[in-house]
Image (spheres, helix red, strand yellow):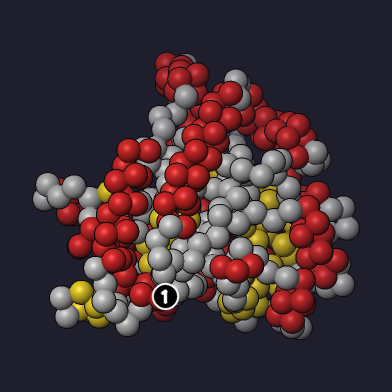
Amino acid sequence: MEQVSYRVAALSESSTIAMNTKTKELQAQGIDVINLTVGEPDFYTPQHIKEAAKKAVDDNYSFYTNVAGYPELLEAISKKLKRENNLDYAPNQIIVSNGAKHSLANAILTLINKGDEVIIPAPYWVSYSELVKLAEGTNVIIETEVESDFKITPEQLEKAITSKTKAFLLCSPSNPTGSVYTRDELKALVDVLVKHPNIFIITDEIYEHINFIGGHQSIAQFPEIKERVVLINGVSKSYAMTGYRIGYMAAASWIAKACNKLQGQMTTNASTIAQRAAIAALNGDQSCVEEFRSAFERRRNLVYDAISKIKGIKCSKPAGAFYVFPDVSSFYGKSFEGKVIKNSDDMSMYLLEKAFIATVPGSGFGNDKCIRLSFATSDEKLKLAMNRLKEALEQLK
């Protein structure tokens, strides 16, 4: 008998992982597929961070740590938040987890009960809505459009709030759109949230340093709501450490304590070697962060300029992260060799099979008009991918 729990049965497979798997299958057959699906830097981890990981092995950092992580890492995160974000979080308000996704899962499972509503602006990262499902909460999706840079208004937020609203989940810079909220835009949302003191704010700031419009703005900076904010971040994107699996949360002490309890029964501590590397990342030379950011900005310009010239595509200019999320819906209803493109899934499959470009359907992100392309790959591959994209779309009639 094959019968999984209703919780697992209700989950959708990650569309990002699914397309990446299909891409690797084609690449294994020798097909030159340009993979624009995966949300990770293509850079290697900086040398001083790798040296710290090697030293940790030699120094026998091979035993369990506290569930929340090494005290030195919690202190490093606390200092980082003060230094870069002017936020005061004591080490006992911070929990280190196995990636930012794990931190998000901890927060959602800790705060959300069955039937609680969680407001999520769309497009959203594929795992947000699925984690809410896992907690048996109810997703309340706020739709946005490319014309507004996929950002919600205070009026939309107010309209979505009900007596069952338990949390508001925000991502800035955004995956998948690259949208970044300014301080004034955040303050306008805070003015709404102040009127509803029972709503928690979960803010995903993992792309904080990949910002093309100036300094990062955190919604946690506003004292009137800070005690209700759960800040999620990590070292994966900023320091090219995706495989190290180090994320963290900072929150009110009682929330951190509850997440510590949950994590203690699920995974205990994150990798000791990766924790030592993360200490070096946060306390060491930060020039690599700007080096990566600058490269992503150059690639953003390259991709956006090319896509903007393709007739039929609507695309907002990403202000952060390393994605573009173009609206390709004007091509729906068109066909190639008898196959009609009906939606974003069809479009991504067409581009994979015809142009050998791997993208992610927007359906998984809550917007079926669009597809997501990552520009976290070389300039040469991006130029070739943009040429292939243009040629493939022009063949749809």
Residue placed most toward the observer, 40 or 178: 178
Along the viewing direction, whichever of 311 and 238 lies nearer the viewer: 311
Q: Residue at x 76, y 32 (%)?
A: 83
Residue 281, percent from left and from top: 56, 27
Name, please, the residue furthest toward the left. 29
**In the shown orientation, is residue 380 left or right of residue 228?**
left
As drawn, is 183 to the left or to the right of 152? right
Side of 389 relative to 240 (left or right): left
Q: Counting other residues with Cα less than 10 Å from the Cα at mark 1, is it few (<14), some (14-19), or many (20 or more)?
A: some
- Classify 175 as above or below 134: above
Badge 1 is on which residue? 329
Looking at the picture, how far across and down is residue 25, in whole percent? 18, 54
Residue 169: x and y, percent?
65, 64
Q: Residue shown at 27%/59% (left/top)? A: 391
Q: Quadrant of residue 187?
A: bottom right
- Name the residue at 58% across, 72% down: 145
Tell me the amino acid under the disc marked 1.
Ser
Percent across and percent down for residue 341 are: 29, 77
